[in-house]
Amino acid sequence: LAKTTQPISMDSYEGQEVNITCSHNNIATNDYITWYQQFPSQGPRFIIQGYKTKVTNEVASLFIPADRKSSTLSLPRVSLSDTAVYYCLVDPGGYQKVTFGTGTKLQVIP
Amino acid sequence: GAGVSQSPRYKVAKRGQDVALRCDPISGHVSLFWYQQALGQGPEFLTYFQNEAQLDKSGLPSDRFFAERPEGSVSTLKIQRTQQEDSAVYLCASSTLAGDNYEQYFGPGTRLTVT
């Protein structure tokens, strides 16, 4: 399973764009990159998934360079409710034994 | 429809007691996963079911841990002779194997405290 590395914590003011970068140097050809969000006392919640280039949904954007050795989750105009832990995963799909790591704790400041 | 549900939400057990944690996945979801999450850590994989078949139990920390999904829907994680190091949140997730969507849907977890 490919290992991921991401910052332990980040702070941001409300209304700013937040970019969280994750490195996954050993990503395999068939692996997808997936991000989850977790609030205290809740299970993780899927945010976005991509294979290459850029993916955008109503919540976030995911940027993946051509070599796929890293990815960046972009959260536009964060609010206090975006304070959570964000996990970057390399996901082989199908049967999905994935490794969550310790995640990035994002604190949004008013 | 309803999401993944888990019961109980909280469980306190004395060391040495047996516990059973229940997971109700989303109806029709083929895959079911159990994770253990220690305080301040990310979820750690325990075991995986595809329908009723337990295809991977490599993450179970000891033979005191046992999981089943006899009819391919509801799953139970059983921990025998609980130890203090078993204290954690136990998360269940389900997903479909359809297409390219690999999203896992998580339940709220069961917080187990062993005293």
Image (cartoon, coloured by chain):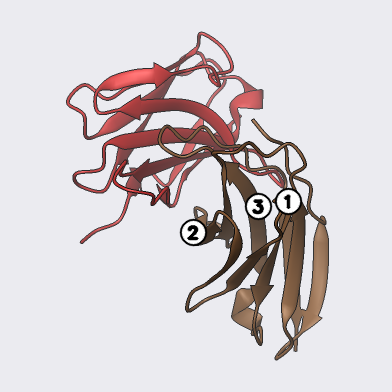
Chain colours: A brown, B red
Q: Which amino acid does label 3 sit on?
A: Cys
Dot 3 corresponds to which residue?
Answer: A88
Residue A83 in view here: no
Residue at the top extreme, as displayed: B63
Can marks 2 and 3 be said to lie on one chain? yes
Disc 2 or disc 3, which is closer to the eye? 3
Density class for disc 2 (Cα within 10 Å; few <14, some 14-19, many ≥20) is some
Quadrant into which the N terminus of chain A falls: top right
Disc 3 or disc 1, which is closer to the eye? 1
Q: Relative to the observer, which residue lies in front, A88 or A45?
A: A88
Image position, residue B67 (x, y; %): 38, 21
Q: Please report the residue visible at 59 percent of the width from the left and 17 percent of the height from the top.
A: B61
Mark 2 falls within which chain? A
- Label located before the other in sequence (2 or 1): 2
Can marks 3 and 1 be said to lie on one chain? yes
Residue B43 in view here: yes
Reply above or below: A76 against B14: below
Q: Relative to the observer, which residue lies in front, A106 or A50?
A: A50
- Label located before the other in sequence (2 or 3): 2
Q: Relative to the observer, which residue lies in front, B103 or A80?
A: B103
Residue at the front extreme, as displayed: A66
The secondary element bearing badge 3 is classed as strand
Please tell me the numbered disc located at residue A67. 1
Q: Are marks 2 and 3 in contact (CB under 8 Å)?
A: no
